[in-house]
Image: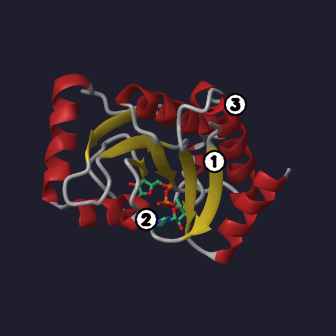
């Protein structure tokens, strides 16, 4: 079986998939945007789990381009995979770091055995990446992932806010 890669407009917190990806920051203690929405929908146990991860294994926070999983608590999903985009406002402009967010998130999903994964437009909000560039990097990284190439995932779904971002991902998928 091959992996379906698709893009839809919607709210990632309502997705009935096994894992959803969060566009977090390195503190893992929540924020605005999709991070705020995921924490609000998952309930306070998500913040507790993130704090525990920080204390146990990430004393300096999660670096940009990396990913780590927690339970998803009150969300329909089973797991939240937290990744941290490079912050263009802080001078982190390396596209490989943004691509790595998608690669490492799928690495974590594969390790968990998740077959269905929803991802937002990591980096394309507060962190300042152009939606079209973020979409190209995201789609290329997902297509090149071994779990996708080998058809280990059933579906990898980009869940986007707004017509412009949806269009950017649909265009990238058509290339
Ligand atoms: N479902 C899907 N997409 C969403 C949702 C949602 N519920 N809410 C927002 N988006 P951003 P970043 C879109 O800013 O650029 C946070 O404060 C949004 O419209 O959430 O990686 C973190 O704590 C945009 O297209 O993530 C960090 O400090 C995309 O998700 C910082 O923002 C990403 O926007 C991370 O910034």
Nearest to the eye among marks 3 and 1: give it: 1
Instruction: Kindly identify the residue that appears in the image at 13 percent across and 46 percent down.
Output: 48
**Label 1 belongs to which residue?**
4
Which comes before the other along the chain, label 3 or label 2?
A: 2
**Tally of marks:** 3
Tell me where residue 67 appears, x and y as whole percent: 42, 34
Tell me where residue 173 appears, x and y as whole percent: 76, 53
Which comes before the other along the chain, label 1 or label 2?
A: 1
Instruction: Kindly identify the residue that appears in the image at 61 percent across and 42 percent down.
Output: 91
Tell me where residue 5 appears, x and y as whole percent: 64, 49
Q: Nearer the viewer, residue 12 or 76?
A: 76
Does the image show residue 65? no
Nearest to the eye among marks 3 and 2: give it: 3
Tell me where residue 85 appears, x and y as whole percent: 52, 43
Residue 171 is left or right of residue 159, and the answer is right
Q: Is mark 2 within 8 Å of ligand 1?
A: yes
Which comes before the other along the chain, label 3 or label 1?
A: 1
Tell me the distance, in whole angstroms, between the alpha carbons under discs 1 and 2: 26 Å
Nearest to the eye among marks 1 and 2: give it: 1
Residue 165 is left or right of residue 35, and the answer is right
- Asked which secondary structure carries label 1, the reply is strand
Q: Which mark is residue 144?
A: 3
Residue 17 is left or right of residue 134, and the answer is left
Crowding at mark 3 (Cα within 10 Å: few <14, some 14-19, many 20+): few
The residue at the far bottom in this view is 163
**Label 2 belongs to which residue?**
33
């Amino acid at each position: 079986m091959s992996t379906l890669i698709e893009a839809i407009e919607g709210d990632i917190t309502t997705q009935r998939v096994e894992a959803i990806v969060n566009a977090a920051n390195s503190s893992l203690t929540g924020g605005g945007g999709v991070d705020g929405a995921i924490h609000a929908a998952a309930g306070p146990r998500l913040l507790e789990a993130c704090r525990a991860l920080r204390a146990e294994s990430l004393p300096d926070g999660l670096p940009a381009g990396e990913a780590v999983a927690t339970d998803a608590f009150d969300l329909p999903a089973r797991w939240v995979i937290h990744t941290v985009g490079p912050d263009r406002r802080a001078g982190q402009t390396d596209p490989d770091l943004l691509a790595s967010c998608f690669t490492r998130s799928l690495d974590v999903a594969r390790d968990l055995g998740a077959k269905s994964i929803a991802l937002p437009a990591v980096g394309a909000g507060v962190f300042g990446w152009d939606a079209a560039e973020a979409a190209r990097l995201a789609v290329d990284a997902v297509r090149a992932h071994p779990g996708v190439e080998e058809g280990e995932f059933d579906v990898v779904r980009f869940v986007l806010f707004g017509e412009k971002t949806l269009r950017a991902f649909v265009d990238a998928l058509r290339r």
